Image (tube, grey):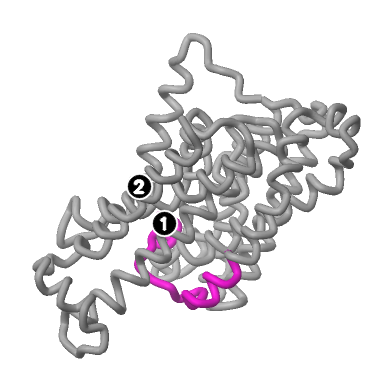
Amino acid sequence: MNRHATFLILLALLAIAVACGIFLGGSGLPAADVIDALLHPGGHGTAQAVVWQLRIPRVLKALLVGSSLAGCGVVFQAVLRNPLAEPYTLGVSAGGALGATVAIIAGLSGIALVFLCFAGCLLSIGAVLAMSTFRDFSTSTIILSGVVLSFLLSSVIMFLFSVASSRDVHASVLWLMGSLSGTDAVALPALLAALLVLLSGLALFARDMNLISLGDEKAHLLGLAPGPLKILLLGLASVVTGLCVAVSGIIGFVGLIIPHAMRRVAGADHQVLLPASMLAGGVFLLACDTLAQVVYRPYEMPVGVITGIAGGIFFLAYLLKASPPEVF
């Protein structure tokens, strides 16, 4: 598909998803009240409070987190040359989850929680790469190392639950399911500023990702030193993941499903694939979050449940293919 047509379609889907996110939600507001609230943002009615204080911030948060996770998936797959690499399958999200669980049980919040998420994500990707050195960074070893690390860190989290109070366990479990209902860890303007800076840094290396995905030897021949750049990209992507985990909990498979889908549509050029995946990731997570709010009113499902179901179906379809296509 033509790249211009791709972005036009994604922008149209984005507009539809944003409209659904604002007009639908956990509480059933009439469409006329929502329109009136949008036209009169300074009002003090119930509709104005719901739309401007709850729904619009939540829509923005879903777009930011979805775009970030999809972008990180593109980076991990390019750097590791592995079509199944993403923050969830590599254990990076699990590292952030352990850091956040420690913070919640210790009564920490805000910057302290974010810092522990960062530390957990960076240590996790470092451990996966260290384990993979025993098999020369083979594709299967990297994914298996991430899966093993996820199980190990999940066991540590279960141990922490066994010695923590029931209130802390309940708060941690709700957080681990993945939710966009609150912005307690990081204020929305700070989240927007931080993610824009980090994602802009990743976008600057889109052309270099094309070279890295060809392999280290070819990248060397084309004048690129892949070693330091890989460490930089993995570090940046892990920090972005840590920030997403800090504000929304564990939301898996966005970084796996979206890059695969967009690679078929937009091609393998990361200068196009990265922004297209980020747009599609925001649309996907916003659609999942809206579904999580309306499917079981007045109760709200964790959005991580919706993305987990979608990811499980994707993995099953991938495994059942007779001859899965090689991405790199």
The location of residue 31, given as percent across then percent down, is 11, 66
Is residue 296 shown left or right of residue 209? Answer: left
Is residue 206 shown left or right of residue 190? Answer: right
**Residue occupied by mark 2:** 305
Q: Residue at x 35, y 64 (%)?
A: 59
**Identity, as a three-letter code, of the amino acid under mark 2:** Val
The location of residue 55, given as percent across then percent down, is 29, 69
**Identity, as a three-letter code, of the amino acid under mark 1:** Gly
Position above or below: 50 against 22: below
Membership of 55 in magenta stretch:
no
**Residue occupied by mark 1:** 178
Magenta range is 173-195
Q: Residue at x 48, y 9 (%)?
A: 322
Q: Nearer the viewer, residue 93 or 32?
A: 32
Element under disc 2: helix
Q: Quadrant of the C terminus?
A: top right
Position above or below: 1 against 299: above
Q: Is residue 16 visible?
A: yes
The location of residue 98, given as percent across then percent down, is 58, 58
Mark 1 vs 2: CB contact within 8 A? yes
